[in-house]
Image: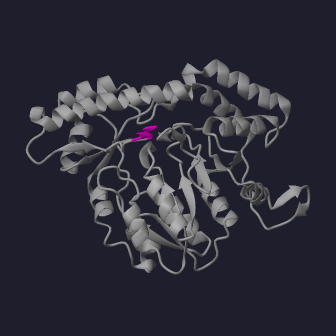
Amino acid sequence: MIPFINIRAQREAYKSEFLQAEQEVLDSGCYIGGPIVQAFETELAALTGAKHAVTCGSGTDAITIALLALGVKPGDEVIVPDFTFIAPAECVMRLGGIPKFADIDVETLQISPESIEAQIGPMTRGIIAVNLFGQCPDYKKIKEIASAHGLWLIEDSAQAFGATQNGQSACTFGDISITSFYPAKPLGCYGDGGALFTHNDELAQKIRLIANHGSSTRYVHEICGMNSRLDAIQAAVLRVKLRHLDEELKKRHENARKYDEFFANYNAGIRAPAGAKIVPQKMADGNTSTYAQYTVLAEKRSSFIEALKSAEIPHCIHYPAPLHEQPCFKMFAQGSENNNAIKACKKAVSLPMCAFTDVEGIVEMLKKV
């Protein structure tokens, strides 16, 4: 069976580097924090151009820490995309906030600036924009809206570390930006991990305090924080992968190009019956993508999935329902007007994608279905 993400092949490709890096940590006796984590944070900041990079226990922790640093209180409303993973809305709700669900652009699948503006009310405090499937939404418009209404902005770049918009790196668009190092991400560790980025010195200090039990001096707790720290061995693994990220992103781009070419021919009538187009997520002008997923919108999704199954090609549905339809959010009774998010949930299918995916082989198998 073709792996959806070929983590084992990546491990084999850099195995000697991984073994050396892991052994150095094990021999050091320093397993949480320490020089390896500090070096990784320095490298993250240098690559993105952010003034501060602070690692933590997961991408979800990173969102929670960002919300705490920005002072979210019970009853505060925070605008989030309706079409994305649950984490942004979940973290808002966990702190007593109210997620307000914005619709998406029908082609790029990114959060819609117009829908953001329509959700703003007297209790709105901020916006969480998600760089979905590896590319950025329209941050110029989103930041203009945030500024005009006095709102803060969190950039959720869990799927897009290494992406750019008009030459600016992802993880630098928000008052606080976050990413995830979950193993399936383009830059993933061997467990959970995450990081936060900011240009603001005061926010960086708050982030570090919150992530370490509210403490900058041992056993002195300035605020009530949480325990969210990156293990040194995960930092060591990530430093190895970071050295190869640029070449892996190039391979992801080339794999996406091969998929694009196949579906362009498919939609031209070579393979597609009438009304059964399969349209890849549109790349917005000025964007580069990490292609965390290669996601298409299939007019007849069930038929397409059957074709994938018959060819033994794995797939995922990102995402099967808009967030406003999730049982845990139904109490908020809003979001049903988000037609683009609803449509995307009925059509979206993600295909195997990573630097080690044999897309040529997959395409050849699809041609035979």
**Residue drawn at the location 70% of the way across and 32% of the way down:** 236
**In the picture, residue 310 is in which quadrant?**
top left
Location of residue 162 with respect to 137 vertically, above or below: above
**Residue 362 is at least partly visible in this image:** yes
**Residue drawn at the location 41% of the way across and 61% of the way down:** 113
Location of residue 237 with respect to 145 vertically, above or below: above
Residue 10 percent coordinates (x, y): 53, 26
Nearer to me, 170 or 256:
170
Q: Quadrant of the N terminus?
A: top left
Relative placement, left or right, of 272 versus 102 is left
Nearer to me, 272 or 154:
154
Span of residues in magenta: 286-292
Residue 132 on the magenta span: no
Q: Quadrant of the C terminus?
A: top left
Location of residue 144 with respect to 350 vertically, above or below: below
**Residue drawn at the location 65% of the way across and 60% of the way down:** 66
Residue 242 percent coordinates (x, y): 61, 30
Relative placement, left or right, of 213 versus 194 is right
Residue 339 percent coordinates (x, y): 28, 65
Magenta span main SS: loop
Relative placement, left or right, of 216 versus 57 is right
Residue 347 percent coordinates (x, y): 26, 53
**Residue drawn at the location 91% of the way across and 62% of the way down:** 220
